[in-house]
Amino acid sequence: MEENTKNSELTEKELKSRMRLFKQALKDETKKDKLQDSIEGSEVMIRFEIYLPTKNPDKFVDGLYLYMNDEGTIMSAEYYLKSSDAMTVKPLGEKEFKVVKELFQDAFSLEIE
């Protein structure tokens, strides 16, 4: 639990630092160019949203977000639940992800040219 808190604090600290950098880049074209030139790489991720069947859709709807790389491999997944007043998104744990990946890996095809 303590490690999780430390990680959350580090994440918040780094996000604030990055946002300051991004805001500076928006105001200064030289800083923007320098930032963009320093990016080491990127990866294409496609998100599929799966709407799961629900007995009472007036109460809530739920589903999965599947994140697939440009090779067509599911890399991560999240479960979501939307009610009339809120939405919660939860990353799947390792065991849950394994089941979802096995079930849906061949359900979608991806072709990028």
Image: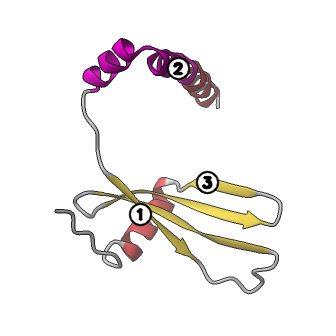
Q: Which mark is residue 98?
A: 1
Looking at the image, residue 61 lies above or below residue 46: below
Q: Earlier in the sequence, mark 3 or mark 2?
A: 2
Which residue is situated farthest in the bottom direction here?
Answer: 55
Q: Nearer the viewer, mark 3 or mark 2?
A: 2
Looking at the image, residue 103 lies above or below residue 47: below
Q: Could you say which is closer to the camera, residue 1 or residue 53?
A: 53
Q: Which mark is residue 58?
A: none
Q: Nearer the viewer, mark 1 or mark 3?
A: 3
Q: Earlier in the sequence, mark 1 or mark 2?
A: 2
- Near mark 3 (Cα within 10 A), the count class, few <14, some 14-19 or many ≥20, is few
Mark 1 vs mark 3, CA separation in Å: 15 Å
What amino acid does circle 3 point to? Lys
SS of the residue under disc 1 = helix
Identified at 22% across, 69% down, the residue is: 111
Q: Which mark is residue 23?
A: 2
Q: Earlier in the sequence, mark 1 or mark 3?
A: 3
Identified at 58% across, 18% down, the residue is: 13
Mark 3 vs mark 2, CA separation in Å: 29 Å
Q: Nearer the viewer, mark 1 or mark 2?
A: 2
Looking at the image, residue 92 lies above or below residue 11: below
x then y, percent, for residue 50: 52, 73
Q: Which residues are magenta?
A: 15-39
Q: Which residue is mark 3?
A: 90
Which residue is situated farthest in the left direction here?
Answer: 113
